[in-house]
Amino acid sequence: MTETAAGLVPYITAREGEDSELLSALRASFAGDGRARLGYWDETPDDRGPRGELWGRCSQNIGRDRLPQGRPQWRMVHPARQRETMMKLLCQVCVRPTRVRGAHLFLDTAPRLEPGKRLLTAHPPVCLEHATAAVDQCPSLRKNHTALLVHRAPLHGVIGTPYQWSAGGLQALPGNDEPLPYTSPMLPWFLASQLVREVREHTVVDLRDLVDAP
């Protein structure tokens, strides 16, 4: 977490000068079972996620305090830092634990949750301190948000870019922000940029009650 004149900058926010890997770094490779999939020419184990999916590379501007530096690129998320906080359920602002009353604290941008509606999220959890700070500083969250104590939220899939291999070589296909489930047959040819969890057990809470609790 860093602080600017505009307020707190989340750890997962991309910074100016952090560049994505070039398309030329990608290639068609083969998994251990012989199936073709997307890969890097100089691939390492860190390039693969929990279900073997390939992750987009992006440089990081990290200071001596081991925190990101540089002008924030608002609305852009750094793939490695988003993956880190979502995997470990750490605060997306300060990278600290997010457990409150035995559950993890998430903020949803919806004013309310529809009963029975499936909730998928690419927003990592937040600690109580920065959940309240986010609502205080962000007009859209102040107007519409739902605080959730999440008891169970297994990994669901990823958001990113689909690719295909043809006679013309490797090509990126039009994508969207819809999460691709880990069960999808498209996963081997998908370049992930955000990790997604499915919220299955949660309790809706009022942040003020959590802050005021002894």
Image (spheres, grey):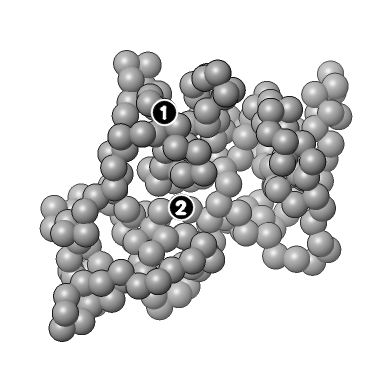
Q: Residue at x 84, y 28 (%)?
A: 208
Q: Classify 10 Å Cα crowding around label 1: few (below 14), some (14-19), many (20 and above).
A: few
Q: Residue at x 52, y 28 (%)?
A: 9
Residue 17: x %, y % from top left: 30, 34
Quadrant, the C terminus: top right
Q: Residue at x 17, y 75 (%)?
A: 169
Q: Is residue 102 left or right of residue 3?
A: right
Mark 1 lies on a secondary structure that is loop
Numbered circle sitting on residue 194: 2
Can you say whether 90 is above or below 161 in the image? above
Residue 145: x %, y % from top left: 76, 44
Question: Foreground mark, 1 or 2?
Answer: 1
Residue type, label 2 = Gln
Residue type, label 1 = Arg
Dot 1 corresponds to which residue? 71
Q: Is residue 164 left or right of residue 159?
A: left
Q: Residue at x 41, y 28 (%)?
A: 71
Determine which quarter of the picture holds residue 126: top right
Q: Nearer the viewer, residue 197 or 201?
A: 197
Mark 2 lies on a secondary structure that is strand
Residue 118: x %, y % from top left: 70, 65
Q: CA distance from mark 1 to mark 2?
A: 21 Å
**Labels in figure, total:** 2
Residue 95: x %, y % from top left: 51, 29
- Answer whether residue 103 is visible to the viewer in this image: no
Q: Nearer the viewer, residue 170 or 129?
A: 170
Q: Which of disc 2 and disc 1 is earlier in sequence?
A: 1
